[in-house]
Image (spheres, grey):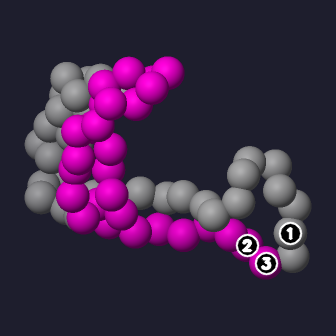
């Protein structure tokens, strides 16, 4: 997602819902791993860092 798209989506949510917390959901294992213990977590974004990303190109990385 490009920054402009993210900003547009966040503005729409802000208008509808107010100034609420933004969280991210992730997992420690690669997709499709079947385990007995769920490996999903939810956390907030702590900071943003701009990096060169090789094949992904220049990007903003969200650190959780």
Looking at the rendered image, the quarter that the C terminus falls into is bottom left
Residue 12 position within the rendered picture, expressed as x and y whole percent measured from the top left: 19, 35
Q: Which mark is residue 35?
A: 1
Q: Are marks 3 and 2 in contact (CB under 8 Å)?
A: yes
Q: Are marks 3 and 1 in contact (CB under 8 Å)?
A: yes
Residue 36 lies, with reference to residue 59, above or below; the image says below
Check if residue 46 falls in the magenta segment: yes
The kind of secondary structure element at disc 3 is: loop
Out of 35 and 22, give the one closest to the viewer. Answer: 35
Q: For residue 53, which quarter of the picture?
A: top left
Residue 39 lies, with reference to residue 60, above or below; the image says below
Q: Are marks 1 and 2 in contact (CB under 8 Å)?
A: yes
Residue 32 position within the rendered picture, expressed as x and y whole percent measured from the top left: 81, 49
Mark 3–mark 2 distance (CA, rounded to whole Å): 4 Å
Check if residue 8 falls in the magenta segment: no
Q: Which residues are magenta?
A: 37-64
Instruction: Determine crowd level at label 3: few under 14, some 14-19, many 20+ residues with C-alpha closer than 10 A.
Output: few
At horizontal 31% and vertical 25% (from top left) the residue drawn is 58
Quick check: can you spot residue 3?
yes
Residue 14 lies, with reference to residue 4, above or below; the image says below
Dominant secondary structure of the residues highlighted in magenta in the image: strand
At horizontal 12% and vertical 58% (from top left) the residue drawn is 19
- Identify residue for label 2: 38
């Amino acid at each position: 997602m490009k920054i402009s798209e993210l900003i547009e989506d966040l503005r729409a949510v802000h208008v509808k819902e107010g100034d609420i917390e933004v969280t991210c959901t992730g997992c420690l294992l690669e997709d499709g791993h079947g385990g007995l213990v769920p490996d999903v977590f939810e956390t907030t974004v702590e900071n943003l860092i701009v990096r060169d990303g090789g094949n992904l190109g220049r990007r903003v990385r969200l650190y959780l």
